[in-house]
Amino acid sequence: MSLACARWHRPLLLLCVLVLLSGCAARLAYNTMNYWIFWYLDDYVSLTPTQESRFESELLQAQAVHRRQELPKLHQHILDFQQDLQRPLTSEQIKSYHYSFTALAEQSVSVFTPPAANLLRYLSNIQIDQINSKITKDLDELRTKREKLSQEEKLQRYTARFEKFSKEWIGSLTDEQQTIIEQLAKHQLDIEPVFFSARNGLYQQWLALLSQRHRPEFDVRLEKLLKDIVGLRYAPVQSQLDQYLQRRFALMAQLNQSLSASQRQYLMNKLTETRKEIAVLIQQ
């Protein structure tokens, strides 16, 4: 289970990754985030009308900055990526793009942290307890579900997930590519305990941070924590996380180098669709 699946930070990460999705549905979600985010947050905390009004106003201001400042960067990064994709990518190129796109996501965190920090700062202790109780419940349920699965079942789920994602972006899989997907799934299963350790450690940092939300440095510390989550950084297991990424880069390079001309064109077309959707968002 990757850190991206840890439910306690999903609302903020959604703001960072939403623009990477293609299609009109994602465009609509981006443009209406000030509506659906309250529906989502309602699962975690009951806000007062004053809190809702203030958060919505600050969220819209942050979104305007993000639309003007960050979306053009993302559009250009995808264009650069497409130019390099005309030829098979090396693991070093994939590594470079991984970190450049991660840096973009972290810049989005910087944009959206202020309204999130202000919301958390002005919540009551009872509301904070609401949030943390729901997060803890979610994590406990997730852990219980995972514990019921055998290693083979987990591997099958990872394989199915990677297969689905790959087919969405390249259209089909050859036998060689299926083998690479299975290696990726096995690699993900092997690192799972490390991911859980990192997630639990970061959650403890979250709990400690919320207890100090009235301190002047709260915004800076919240931004750092969210960037660490996005950037897959957790010092106690960082060496293992870095090794995981290096192996993943190598496998992704193998997969990229195995693409046929039609698969590569399929991927290029998907990226072009995404880039066009971002261009529309920039102009709205």
Image (tube, grey):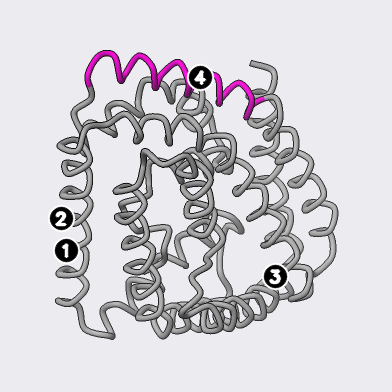
Whether residues under marks 2 and 1 lie with C-beta atoms below 8 angstroms apart, the answer is yes
Which image quadrant for residue 76? top right
Q: In the image, 253: left or right of 15?
A: right
- Label 2 vs label 4: CA separation? 30 Å
Task: Please name the residue shown 79% across and 44% down the image.
Answer: 79
Name the spot of residue 264 as percent of width and height, x first.
72, 59
Q: Nearer the viewer, mark 3 or mark 1?
A: 1
Residue wearing tag 3: 256
Q: Name the residue under label 2.
A: 137
Marks 3, 4: nearer the viewer? 4
Direction from residue 217 to residue 84 in the image, left or right: right
Classify mark 1: residues with Cα within 10 Å, few (<14), some (14-19) or many (20+).
few
**Mark 4: amino acid:** Leu
Q: Give the quadrant of the N terminus.
A: bottom left
Amino acid beneath label 3: Asn
Disc 1 marks a residue whose amino acid type is: Asp
User: Which of disc 4 and disc 3 is earlier in sequence?
Assistant: 4
Q: Distance between the residues labelled 2 and 1?
A: 5 Å
Which residue in the structure is indicated by mark 4?
60
Q: Which image quadrant for residue 3?
A: bottom left
SS for callout 3: helix
Decide if residue 244 is on the left or right side of residue 137.
right
Q: Does the magenta stretch include residue 65?
A: yes
Question: Going from the N terminus, do you reach mark 2 or mark 3 first?
Answer: 2
Element type at mark 1: helix
Question: Dot 4: what SS?
Answer: helix
* Residue 163, placed above or below residue 123: below
**Amino acid tagged 2:** Lys
Q: What stretch is highlighted in magenta?
A: 48-67
Residue annotated with mark 1: 140
Of labels 4 and 1, earlier in sequence is 4
Give neighbour class at mark 4: few <14, some 14-19, many 20+ (Cα, 10 Å).
some
